[in-house]
Image (cartoon, grey):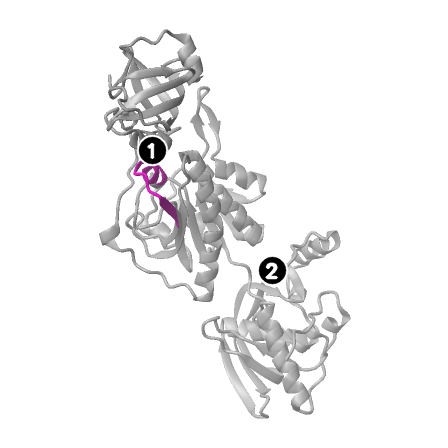
Amino acid sequence: MTLPPLKILFLGAGEFALPTLEKLAAAIPAENLLVVSQPARAKGRGRKKSPTPVSEKAGALGLEQFTPKDINSPASRAAMQDFEPDYLVLVDFGTRLAPATIALPKKAAINLHPSLLPAFRGPAPMAWALIKGEPVTGVTTQLIGEKIDCGHILLQDPTFIRDHETLPELSRRLSLIGAPLVIDTIEGLESGSLEPRPQDENLASKAPKFKKEDGLINWNENATAIFNRIRGLNPWPGTYTFHRGKRIKIIKAVPAAETPLLAPAPGELRADGQRLLVGCGQNSLLEILELQPAGKPLRTAAQFLNGQQLKQSDHFSTS
Amino acid sequence: MSILEIETYPAAVLKQKATAIENIDDSLRELADSMLETMYRAPGVGLAAPQVGRSIRLLVADPGSREEPEPMILVNPKIITAEGRTSMQEGCLSVPGFTAEVERYKQIVVQAWTLDEREVELELEDFPAILLQHELDHLEGILFIDRISRLKRNIYERKLKKGTLPED
């Protein structure tokens, strides 16, 4: 006799959850995987209702799915209880689970978190790792507890952050590293070789959600810090500044290779052929690559420079 | 010890009633060891001799966990009492890629011989009881798919014909 394959309740919504869902779908029979996602929501200009990326993928893979309005309602819980899951796996789901929901699976409720816990607990760990200029980040599987991202650590996989890596690039890469880690975690728990260990509270840090205002660039910071903010906050909430009183989004930039003897003052613009340079704090320079004036299409630096006569007094400012 | 080849449905040996063992000797001990190794490697939790092509009344099983294995080897086992009902999702190394809920007795007492020629009586409940009923069935030429509804069995037969069962 063989034991039946494990039953897994998978809770996910965003793109980050897709590689894990695919790995699980390849590892166990379809009838042993129940996908739970958020209901289709109106989004975009047309406000058309669209399913979550996880919901779409589950459909493509022919998996059974459940998209309740309230995951923690007694009715939702009863539906998930009927499935008799061995494990609950939560990745990029976006809603907090009630203790009774966490207690649903027979064996364990686990989460894949895109940081090396206890660093960067909270909803925006990858953006914070980029903004803080961390050299290394990674993924962690943890037991889900009542306090968000404070559960016992199961497995971790660290990785170097690449030089010019942006948030979407880092997110994609960590999602791919995380998927096999989830499989290893379940196998480790099954074989009893995995010992959950508590997080060290002394090393904990937070990664709270961002607000639109967090995207306002302070040109007094040095070019590296501004660059980190730009790559950490795009595409959402985005980084911006003001030029001639009008709001302008800064989409892509790099610290300039040159270190001028005397850089322009913070916020001051300088054209160097087709290049657009901005003075930053500590005598540093940032090269703007892509930007988007309010209500206009995205432009490269060259297109921006061609579109207007840059004056000596032209500068980016905070209002 | 060696890894043995596992017979799969619809092999004839799986449909046959196995014969009683008369001598417990070294060749039987070696077969039992190889069956255990084959079972762990598969991985499975139980294996009966007909599943490795030997139509004799020998089975191996392990209702324990990977950290705390509880291997057992039984010669000429038989159920002497049985009561209650229970069920769980079962799978079988001879019926790859398919599982189904099977109804079984909840508690059984099994009488058998061990390899050191002792007679034992085992009182079993829940999972270990289900496991031994599944393996004892093999000695009677019965597979778990013989104990499920016609409809579910048809699903399996169709998948088998179409070759859409998952590869291990």
Residue occupied by mark 2: B99
- Report the residue that reaches farthest toward the top: A309
What residue lies at 75% left-to-right and 68% top-to-bottom? B11
Closest to the observer: B96 or B101?
B96
Q: Where is residue A304 shown, x and y percent of the image?
A: 41, 13
What residue lies at 59% left-to-right and 74% top-to-bottom? B133
Give the extent of the magenta segment. Answer: A126-139
Image-based side of A60 in relation to A221, left or right: right
Closest to the observer: A49 or B129?
A49
Q: Where is residue B130 shown, x and y percent of the image?
A: 55, 71
Query: Share a chain, discs 2 and 1?
Result: no
- Report the residue that reaches farthest toward the front: A261
Q: Quadrant of residue A251?
A: top left
Mark 2: secondary structure: strand
Q: Which chain does the numbered disc 2 sit on?
A: B
Closest to the observer: A194 or A53?
A194
Residue occupied by mark 1: A228
